[in-house]
Image (cartoon, helix red, strand yellow):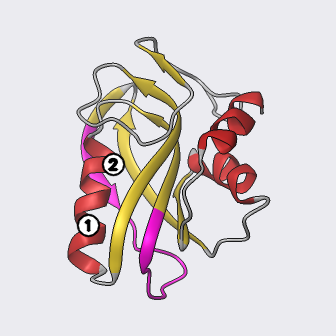
Amino acid sequence: MNLCKKLSNKITDKFDNLLIIGTGGWIVGKIINKNSNLPIFTMICKSYRNKKQGKIVISKVIPDQKLSGIILIVDDLIDSGSTLITIKKHLIENFRDITDIKIAVLIKKSKSKIIPDYYVLETDKWVVFPYESN
C-alpha cells in the first residue's frame, strides 16, 4: 500500500484516461485514480508462465470505447519491458486519437528495455506481490 501511495505522489502530470493493465495493475490503478476520477480502461496482458516469459497475449481494451488524449498506463511491475512495448505499439496502431502515453509502475527491473515515466523501486529479484498466488 505504501508503494502505491509513493507512486501516486510522483505522478504530477495531467492525463485524460487511465489504462490499467490487469491483473497486477488493478490495485495500483485504483489507488492512483482515487483522487483524480479519470476514466478507467483496462487491458489484460499475459506473457509469463512458470516464471518464464513467452508469447505476449493482449486482450481488447475494456470498456470498448474510444481511448484518446494523454494516457497513463498503470501496472505493478516492468520486467524486461517487452509487454509494455507491445502494449504501447498496440495502442498507437489502434487508437489514432492518443496524443501521448506515459507509464507508471511500482517496481522496475534494471534489465528493462524501457524506463517507465514513474516508478518507486528498482530491483533484479523475482517479485511476488501479496495479491498473487505462488
Q: Which residue is mark 1?
A: 90
Residue span colored magenta: 54-71
User: Residue at 33% across / 84% down in the picture?
Assistant: 97
Q: Position of residue 69 (x, y in %)?
A: 43, 77
Q: Residues within 10 Å of mark 2 (few under 14, many from 20)?
A: many
Q: Which residue is mark 2?
A: 84
Q: How many marks?
A: 2
Q: Is 70 within the magenta?
A: yes
Q: Is 120 within the magenta?
A: no
Q: Could you tell whether 76 is left or right of 112 in the image? A: right
Q: Could you tell whether 91 is left or right of 29 in the image? A: left
User: Residue at 58% across / 23% down in the picture?
Assistant: 128
**Which dot marks residue 126?**
none
Q: Position of residue 28 (x, y in %)?
A: 66, 46
Q: In what element is the residue under mark 1? A: helix
The image quadrant of residue 80 is top left
The image quadrant of residue 123 is top left
